[in-house]
Image (spheres, grey):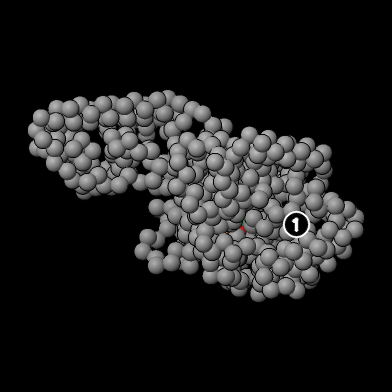
Amino acid sequence: METTLRGVGVSHGVAIGQVRHMGTAVLEPPVKEIPAEEAEREQQRARHAVEATAADLTARGNLAGGEAQAVLEAQALMAQDPELMADVDRRIAAGGTAERSVYDAFSRYRELLAGAGEYMAQRVADLDDVRNRIVARLLGVPMPGVPDSDEPYVLIARDLAPADTALLDPTLVLGFVTEEGGPTSHSAILARALGVPAVVALPGASEITEGTVVAVDGSTGDLFVEPSGAKRAELAKAAEERRAALAASSGPGATSDGHKVPLLANIGGPGDVPAAVEAGAEGVGLFRTEFLFLDDSKNAPSRDKQIQSYRSVLEAFPEGRVVVRVLDAGADKPLDFLTPTDEPNPALGVRGLRTLLDHPDILATQLTALAEAAEGLPVHLDVMAPMVADRHDARAFADACRTAGLNAKFGAMVEIPSAALRARSLLQEVEFLSLGTNDLAQYTFAADRQVGALSRLQDPWQPALLDLIALAADAARTEGKSCGVCGEAASDPLLACVLTGLGVTSLSMGATAIPYVRATLANHTLAQCERAAAAARATDTADEARRAAQAVLSEEG
Ligand code: PEP
Ligand code: MG
């Protein structure tokens, strides 16, 4: 029977398909004794599971190619290690179940590896993955990580870490639903980057049975479980009409009376460029370079690899503006070789620019790679730092850019309330500001952006957040400099009008939101946007602010 659940819609569109769950870490199988006559059958079960896991890893390697193939083949070999298998057999003969014996044999091997020097210790995570796969197969539970499926599916996860993203095949993931994660979490950002409908902060999502057909409406936040034929047809029709209307809007971003607001794309790397170009992005407002670093959490990418990646993005926007954000590691994007592991509150610890100032070599390599990538290209390169707290930070970043000989504008992200409060002081050191409203909301409301239960406080319509945005935009106007928004706030079409009314000079968002924002902005005058902004700021809650702005924007221009 059709039931409806409601979360927070974070990426427009409708997806209908079968549920596949993101496998969670394998639980430790219980210790159970088996009778001696079952030992042979258990040993066979263990062998089959090992062989099937090795075959699966090899097949995945063949599909992936490149460096991933080498890693997966090495894992396939680990799975079949004769000594490990002999240990599993011995443990079963002594009365263990197949799953427990595999678990224990691998744990012993793990200890040996962990104590055998740094190189071997780094293989521990690969070994754990192999163990989890074999045990999951034996227990008949979903494989850990991204589901194995040849058919397109709707992915349900508790939350998605940026590191999971590398493994997702956008041709198979029809839509996302997560139980955790607020509107500014990286699962939401990732869904927008993939251009698939998504709903986050939906309690109970993980209880939906694997294989159930669901319809995800990423605009309203509704999840229809076992939707009727009529409901499916209604959703598909509405989505199609919306798409057609949007396809009709094109050109640079502007209000109906011609006030220009460049619409830029947020990207994680060259792979996101085609969608940005197709959506008509006027450039890139946020290139999250950390995704280049997440490929290998043990080492920074080489200078050459960085140059190649930066250049391919810069070449895609020959006359446009490309804002590259230097590495933003830490908190929910930890890197083994940079991020401290002993911090009680990583979001309040050494992350973003703080990490780079502690590792000037990493920053210098990134900046010189950018300088070289931009050489000879007509592009307007802007470079900005994440998590700038004060003028001292802004100056340190500008100094590093100058030392690297970068021919670009240097900017600061406004993600910490102190930066918004003292925006004029920051602007004595840098040439532009970019509001990272995701983190700005997190730090203004002391509400972890990864915690779905706090989504009310991460709502970018919160009047206190609008006040801070207004402060930064006013400071930039006074200094004759620009102040854009590159947080997820920019991708909400109504809020985009309010941000414009607050004096924000450009809007950067996931490519799929660009047509929605362009079409809405083109329907309203600048004066109307300013009135909507004032009306929203005069309220006390996010819901009231949204309604107040909506009322003004529904009036005739
Ligand atoms: C932000 O915090 O708003 C932002 C754009 O940066 P990120 O989401 O990558 O932290
Ligand atoms: Mg941020």
x then y, percent, for residue 545: 72, 67
Foreground of the two, 288 or 200: 200
In the figure, 521 relative to 308: above or below? below
x then y, percent, for residue 420: 65, 70
The residue that appears at 75% across and 68% down in the rendered structure is: 536
The residue that appears at 72% across and 49% down in the rendered structure is: 264
**Image quarter hosting the N terminus:** top right
In the figure, 159 relative to 356: above or below? above
x then y, percent, for residue 392: 58, 71
Q: Which residue is mark 1?
A: 494
Foreground of the two, 188 or 480: 188
In the figure, 198 relative to 554: above or below? above
Circle 1 sits in a helix, a strand or a loop, which is it? helix
Foreground of the two, 277 or 244: 244
Q: Is residue 93 left or right of residue 468?
A: left
Count of labels in the image: 1
The residue that appears at 77% across and 66% down in the rendered structure is: 548
For ligand 1, the image quadrant comes to bottom right
Q: Is residue 497 left or right of residue 267?
A: right
Q: Residues within 10 Å of mark 1 (few under 14, many from 20)?
A: many
The residue that appears at 65% across and 74% down in the rendered structure is: 421
In the figure, 398 relative to 321: above or below? below
Task: Say if residue 305 shows up in the picture.
Answer: no
- Amino acid on which disc 1 is placed: Leu
x then y, percent, for residue 436: 63, 60
**Image quarter hosting the C terminus:** bottom right
